[in-house]
Structure formats: structure tokens, C-alpha cells
Amino acid sequence: MDKEPNSFEIQSEYIPTPEEVHSILKELIGKEYKEVRKLEDEQGLYILEVVIPGEKEGEETGYEYMRKGRYKEGQSSTIEIHVVYYENSIPVGGTSAARYVDGKWIIL
């Protein structure tokens, strides 16, 4: 019996390089950021997390890239960058910022 392919495991599509991910992060953020986590496997970069300070004491904004797939750290059905807002290290909101579709980044 044929098993239906898992959409999280299909990896035949193009995977953005770390340089391409940093390029879209620079476009989204528009200023210097600090890299806090970078994970790669045999197919390349699958998680990249960066942060910038917020406007007030204790605030921080995180930008989190995840490649399509299933990993021990989580899963994603698309290649996306999410924004997470923190107050005193606690997430208080967030949204999708960009999605990689048909070889190009779409800012959401």
C-alpha cells in the first residue's frame, strides 16, 4: 500500500541559503540585529533566530526563520519568517513577516 507523502517531509524544492535569509532579515528589520540561534542540517539552514531591542526597557523583537519541514525544535509547512514580540523575555504577540514562495520572498 502506497503511503501518501507527508507535506512536512517533501524537500525537493529550493532551500534559501543563509545569505538569502540574512538578506531578507536586513530588509525586514532595517538595522543591526543579533543572531541568537542558527541550526543547520545536511540540507542547509533550517532555523535562524535574531533579535533587536525594543523601544522600552525589557522589550525585544525576535525574527524567527524556519525552513519547511519537521524538526525536533518544531515544524513548518512553509518556509517563513515570523516576528515575536517579547516583554521581559515573555512572548506577548507576533505575526508572520515573510514567506518564501516560488523562489522569492513575499513580505506579508
Image (tube, rainbow, N blue to C red):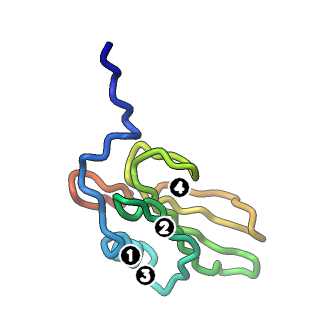
Secondary structure of the residue carrying tag 4 is: strand
Q: Marks 1 and 2: CB-CB under 8 Å?
A: yes
Q: Amino acid at mark 2?
A: Leu
The residue furthest top is 1
Residue marked by disc 1: 22
Indicate the amino acid at tag 1. His
Mark whose residue sits in front, 1 or 4: 1
Q: Are marks 1 and 4 in contact (CB under 8 Å)?
A: no
Pick whichever of labels 1 and 2 is earlier in the sequence.
Answer: 1
Q: Nearer the viewer, mark 1 or mark 3?
A: 1
Q: CA distance from mark 3 to mark 2?
A: 17 Å
30 vs 60, left or right, is left
Q: Residue 66 placed where, x, y %?
A: 45, 57
Question: Residue 95: which disc?
Answer: 4
From the viewer's side, name the closer residue of 43 and 102: 43
Identify the residue at horizontal 65%, vertical 81% (top origin).
55
Q: Is residue 62 above or below residue 75?
A: below
